[in-house]
Amino acid sequence: MGMTAQTSTADATASRADGAPVVGPAAMLITLTVNGVAQTIQVEPRTTLAEVLRGPLDLTGTKIACNRGACSACTVWLDGVTVCSCMMLAIEVGARKVTTIEGLAQGDTLHAVQAAFIEHDAMQCGFCTPGMAMSCAALLEHTPHPSADEVMTAISGHFCRCGTYPHVVAATLAAAAQSKA
Amino acid sequence: MANDTGTRAETFPVGIASVGLAEVTRQVTGDEPPALAPNAALAVIGKPTPRQDGRAKVTGATRYTVDIKLPGMLHGRILRSPLPHARIGSIDVSAAARLPGVRAVLTIVRPDDPASAVVRYVGAPLAAVAAVSINVAEQALRLIRVDYEALPFVTDMDQARAAAAPQVFDSASAPQGYASGFPAAHGLPLVGNVRGPAMQARGDAVQGFAQAAVTVEAEYRTQVQTHCCLEPHATIADWREDGLTVYQSTQFTAGVRKELAAAFGLPPQRVRVVVDGMGGGFGSKSSLGNYGRIAVTLSRQAGAPVRIVLDRQEEQMDAGNRPGTWQRLRIGAQRDGGLTAISLRSYGTAGVALGAGVGNVAQAMYECPNFDGAQYDVFIHSGPGCAMRGPGNTPGAFGMEQAIDELAEKLAMDPLALRDRIDASPVRREERRLGAERIGWSRRHASGAPVTDGGPVKRGIGMAQSIWVANVQTNSACEVRIHRDGTVEVLSSVQDIGTGIGTVMAQVVAEVLGLRPEDITVRIGDTEFPAGPPSYGSRTTASITPPARSAAWRALQSLLRVAAPGLAVSPEDLLALGGRIVVRDQPARGMLFREATALLRTDRISEVASRSDDYGGFRQRMGTDAALAQQDLGGVQFAQVAVDTETGIVRVERVVAVHDCGRPMNPRLIESQVQGGVLMGLSYALFEHRILDRHTGRMVNPNLEQYKLVGARETPAIEVILLENYQGRSATDAYGVAEPANIATAPAIANAVYNAIGVRLRSLPMTPAAVLAALGRMTAGSARP
């Protein structure tokens, strides 16, 4: 696990034979850097990153729909890499920077993917939309000019029951076409 | 304004715009707005306006029910039966109640009441707790001691039909009717687990078959599908001395309020139901639900808000499903294709609920003088089904639209030519023409013809049609406020389940007031506003856009009366146009809209309008609150598939979906909905399958990874063609599209698969195993799901 020096707790005095600290079940203090802001919070070690984001940090744009890594609605970035935040404990995050859907826009300026999602109606009920947008934006960070097939691969782990996949692909390709890179 | 001004004649456009429009004159009541021009002549309606809440949705700002936190909010969890059929001898909740952090405990099953002591499906609620956290609540559930007497059970519909099968209900305990969704007749006999039949008949089917030159007969089977809304079913109940507020992810705020008032003995005006973001329903969030009732009861007991959110396993077990069906169709025809008789017999199971019929496709799609239908419900020990996108007609079309293709083949007719012969709908005729042209029907090879490339992948094209009644909720209302500062609000309890209805309402009001959609503030999803329609039955747009236009038009008349004196004209000479109030025929003369509103002597003008009857009347009233419009909805879909005959994998490469919904209000939003209907239908056709373990009664795939849904990689190219089909029936002439878009997809794919491989798949889902079995490359036994 990605335990770091930032993690501290009164209970974490014991250690396993291999020297790794034993934590829990009591709550412990961790510092998370989310959307550029470092925040120290108390969490039970069993708490997932998704639960911490949605609970104490009130960043409810990250959705929990299956809670076992099957639907990708909870997708956030960890140092720019997409992860299912329901499949990771908050104490595993360590010093890695978390970006959620609330941190994707630069101030009032939407990320190109967000703007294209609106333009192409790449949403219906919108519950899967934050996760979709995070995966599509991450794709463009690494692959500025993807093919439709690459977009579909990037969102292949996401479920959208409303059926927005065609518009999500169209929006992402349009966002890519706008960028000069 | 009172509805006392008599009637007047209005002349409306009618017909399909791309074919040619005619006019019809109808009498309307005096307070109805004038006839609305075709979309081509309008500024806002019919344009692809982006949805108003798009920015909130892409930034994560939209608050769904699961996102709401109230001060002091407790977390509720429900203890559920692990057995499919059991008598509960006792429930001991004392240890749970003593656990620190537990604030309320509710026993749902009452062992001392024989009617309440029996549970009939895995997942049936037994007890519930509210605690300071979900973890404490779950710990408390583990402390509840339940004494079960296991009873015999049956979870397979065919086995349940046998005389010796364990009985789910007796006639006293069986559900008698259907509260929501697809109707099931009351008062039908129950024999064993089989209830019915619900009979539909016209003419003389025996005679009709005797006249037939050609007869086809086949059996079709469809699986249970679950709704899989991404947002789970969720309620936050806040019981206070002065009233009850419930935040619920619901398709019908006004209906849930009515249910709450009745269930808890409260006056409706002291019950408020609120939903902002709504993460999908598809029929499964149409009513209060057992979880909603439990949340309110716990809140009343605890004196604090209680939140209940189902987890994904609960979603799959006890949040509704589309019933599984078996149907046998027999169709007789003359040599030229003219139908002489149709016979339908169906058995379906909604578990412990009713409503598993196969709809009215066989009865109503085609001209046929003689029809004989008998539909049965079969009870099994599994979670209750409920309405799901096109209930009844979706499994019904899977059978009927294949049977029609089977008939066409036997008659040596092209499937389109046969439908042209037997389908009286001029709308679907045009839809077939447009779709055939787009998909390239003329290059379709004969079904099962040898494919020249000799490879293992065979391609085919198929089509199918949908039919759906045009529902209207007659007690739908809407308020429009024009404020002195020039701002405009439109208010209704109608909820947006993802269709963008709020944006459409803004378009309607903007069109009337000569403003832009973004000038209109939409406030919906709250029963404090005038009661709006449900978001089910493809009725929302048909129900709420006419009153939105009426209310805006009446408010505008008041504003024009205020503005007229300053312009030295009469109000009738004024128009709202381009953000201004101008003199008709002298558009340079006038004032800004907000200059006009500044003349108001009150803070605002407000008009509430309700849904008027369709001009020329409805086809049929449905109870006190709903009606059916004169003309059915529907559509025609074409699918192109590639079937790998070595792996059995069916790949849908392309779908052309041609639909009409009266006047299209916002083609971009409609396109999204049609794509969604196609994808849900594709998913139904190829992937989805609720699997029950017949030895334990448990669902073996109660999740989103083993319960297979269509993903982006299985998504075909979907081309949507929309007709503008004017009928002159209401202030907007708009109807729905959500369900018709789902109904035709699975049979279109099945017909395409047949065209590709020459073997017909009459059972869903069309998995690789089923395809290989059909090709004789696997034994049928090993392919049977």
Image (cartoon, rainbow, N blue to C red):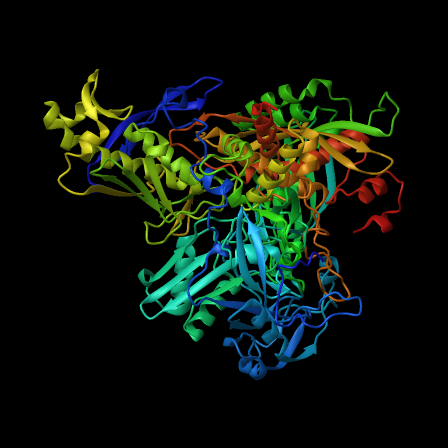
- Residue B373 placed where, x, y %? 62, 47
Quarter of the image that includes the N terminus of chain B? top left
Q: Is residue B730 visible?
A: no
Does B244 sit left or right of B468 as displayed? left
Residue at image location 32% in from the left, 65% down from the top: B267
Residue at image location 44% in from the left, 75% down from the top: B301
Q: Is residue B356 above or below residue A23?
A: above
The quarter of the picture where residue B408 lies is top right
Q: Is residue A143 above or below residue B290?
A: above
Does B538 sit left or right of B728 as displayed? right
- Residue B762 placed where, x, y %? 75, 42
Does B430 sit left or right of B10 as displayed? right
Q: Camera-side residue: B413 or B121?
A: B121
Q: Camera-side residue: A70 or B59?
A: B59
Does B731 sit left or right of B444 as displayed? left
Q: Is residue A7 visible?
A: yes
- Residue B679 placed where, x, y %? 63, 38
- Residue B114 placed where, x, y %? 58, 79
Q: How many marks?
A: 0
Residue at image location 19% in from the left, 34% down from the top: B597
